[in-house]
Amino acid sequence: MVNKSVKQQLVEHVASLLECRSCPHMHPAVVSGGPVVSRVLLVGQAPGDKEPVLGRPFAWTAGKTLFRWFKEAAGVSEAQFRSSVYMAAVCRCFPGKKATGGDRVPASEEILNCARWLDRELLILRPALVIPVGKLAINQFIPSGKLDDIIGRQFPVARAGNSFDIIPLPHPSGASPWHRMEPGKSLLKKALDLIVKHPQFRVMLSSFVACGGGDRG
Ligand code: SF4
């Protein structure tokens, strides 16, 4: 039997993921960043209502802030980031709106349903660095705690038969002012510095240099 390449496994994985309809209260379509072979994973929370229409994660205002952070910290453009980092999420479908406004927080059963996709990605890609964005994503890897105690730190994690580092980021949505006020501002900068200095992120950055700099303007 011929072993499938990581790329082939990931292509098949994403094709299956896009067909998932396990959660009856989630709104299709499934949002995926595509089969990007990478040892750096970003794990978001759940898409909003714009992402299924635009067909990519972090496609709206929170994404603008997130990609600006990486541009300022590492000179990485949104296009470079999307083509070099595998973008996963706690839930890959839009949960819908709450009656009181704002997006519904995924139910624990939905989080559990979608965790099998993340586990499979950890198995296929064997990442060295995982960047969970927002409390819901962070809590999939380490016990919940105050952002003040978690952001700006690196944690060793074992999951799905793989060991890797996580460096959490706060959620970039405008809903929370945490990252715009102290100590959040300084802790966010510390977290981004840790990511940029992480050996696996540096491998990614050096590949941009080897490719002639690409779209870093
Ligand atoms: S949230 Fe995840 S598990 Fe649920 S339907 Fe969407 S892709 Fe499937």
Image: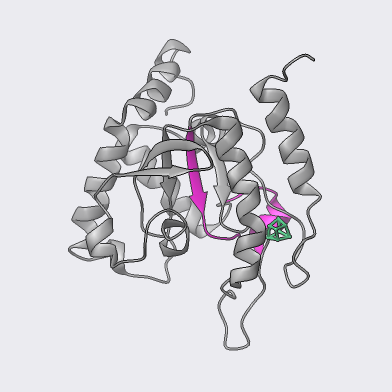
Look at the picture and state if 80 lies above or below 68.
above
Which quarter of the figure is the N terminus placed in? top right
Q: Is residue 44 magenta?
A: yes
Instruction: Please state the extent of the stretch shown in magenta in the rendering.
Output: 40-57
Residue placed at 51% from the left, 38% from the top? Answer: 161
Residue placed at 60% from the left, 54% from the top? Answer: 115
Residue 119 as seen in the image, left or right of residue 21: left
Residue 168 at x, y = what percent? Answer: 35, 51
Residue placed at 72% from the left, 17% from the top? Answer: 3
Look at the picture and state if 1 lies above or below 79.
above
Q: Nearer the viewer, residue 18 or 164?
A: 164
Q: Quadrant of residue 163?
A: top left
Residue 135 as seen in the image, left or right of residue 115: left
Residue 144 at x, y = what percent? Answer: 36, 65
Q: Is residue 50 magenta?
A: yes
Residue 19 at x, y = what percent? Answer: 81, 50
